[in-house]
Image (cartoon, rainbow, N blue to C red):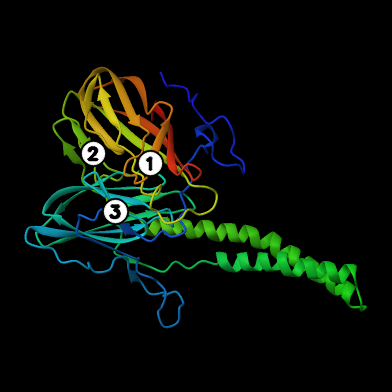
Amino acid sequence: MTPERDDLPRRRPGLAAYRTREDAYARPRPLRLGDSEMRVLNDRITALARPSASRSDPRTGLPNRAPVRALSEPGLQPGPGEGVLSVLADGGGAAPVVSVDGVPVSVGDGQLDLVLLAGTHRVEVQSTYTVDPVDIAITDGGTYTLQFFEDPATGRAVFGELPETRDFIPTSAGCWSWLALTSLICCLPMSGAMIGLPSEDWHLPSGVALGVLAVVLIVTGLPLYRRAKAKYHRDLATQRQAAPREPVPHGTDAIHLGAKPTALPPLPEGTAAIDLRLTCGRHLWAGHRKAAHGSFLARAWTRPPRVYINGTERPASWGHWRYLVPTGAYQVTVAIDGRPLNLDIPARHTGNPEKQRDLRIEAHAGRATAVHAEAHVYAVWRPATGDIESYEPRLWLEPA
């Protein structure tokens, strides 16, 4: 039976401060930072953080319309038995956190170059939402590149192997916005002054004509601005597409499918599957103004979920998983912990630290039963007390 969503926020937040989890928005909003430049969180690693390559022409300051490379060449040299991982994080000012093998290594927008031992590693990024982690293989002396992109307007986030070059995307949204604002701020007041206080005979007809023109520009300019802006974000989403990746097996009965698998693995004869997609919205709140540099709340890391099938714990992370099971009835259990990790200032928790949901399903041979787990975690910066307060998380477990 699908559980009812009886744990939604009960109050609509206004202009007052974010007081409790009951004041939270239903969907998380990005944590904006006054300075979102990337910085390294761990002094014991060999890493270099630097700003993303600019599209502006250094001679003119105008946007370069030619295709540009997304990532710069790594600024580090690996030693014997080592390689370099380069991660380009573009969270639109939301300060994404990058982790390698479960350890956060950087926060902010920019390019991270990190020296790693040759072998397999798991790379994950958390921002407004969690995304599927990516398993990579670092070769001796080699370089591996990944990109994370979050569109602040739509909340869409992708992580993986994105195109190495970026084409210029033209848009007329700025022109329509400028016309509408100029008409509203300049033309309408001038029209009102000419109509209300005419000092010459021509002021009245000119003021009426100017007012009509301003109204026409506003009425037509705003819809055209919205249309141009929506088209720009559609073109941006088309350009920033991650390449499909091979599913990664974990043992004999768990497979991490990822956000965009190359192909779903076939089910063995007589076997069923449970496809579980785990997502988490991260409500990080530091006030209505932009927060200062990401030295406290922005570096928060959300713990991975725990998954049990008929009481047996299975491998899990945020993302899309497939569990192979015999046919029959099963109880799927998902548990999450709402206390953030990786903080460098005092923290306290209000309410239960964990949330757990159970769902009974029927698995049939040759079929995959889709299940969706949606979690929300909450952490608030309290400047009056100088600490971070987290709250009981929310969790829903439903058939997809």
Closest to the observer, 332 or 306: 306
Q: Element under label 2?
A: strand
For discs 2 and 1, the disc positioned in front in the rendered view: 1
Query: Distance of mark 2 from mark 1, alpha carbons?
Result: 35 Å
Q: Residue furthest top?
A: 329
What is the crowding at mark 3: few (fewer than 14 residues within 10 Å), some, or many (at least 20)? some
- Sequence order check, earlier mark of 3 and 1: 3
Which residue type carries mark 3? Leu
Closest to the observer, 330 or 286: 286
Does residue 378 appear in the picture of this structure?
A: no
Q: Residue at left 63%, top 57%?
A: 223
What is the crowding at mark 1: few (fewer than 14 residues within 10 Å), some, or many (at least 20)? few
Q: Residue furthest left?
A: 80
Q: Element under label 1?
A: loop
**Up-down relation of residue 259 to residue 86 (above or below):** above
- Quarter in which the C terminus is drawn: top left
Relative side of 304 to 391, left or right: left
Closest to the observer, 93 or 198: 93
Q: Which residue is mark 1?
A: 346
Q: Residue at left 48%, top 68%?
A: 170
- Sequence order check, earlier mark of 2 and 1: 2
Which residue type carries mark 1? Pro
Which residue type carries mark 2? His
Residue 41, numbered circle? 3
Q: Which residue is mark 2?
A: 256
Query: Distance of mark 3 from mark 2, alpha carbons?
Result: 28 Å
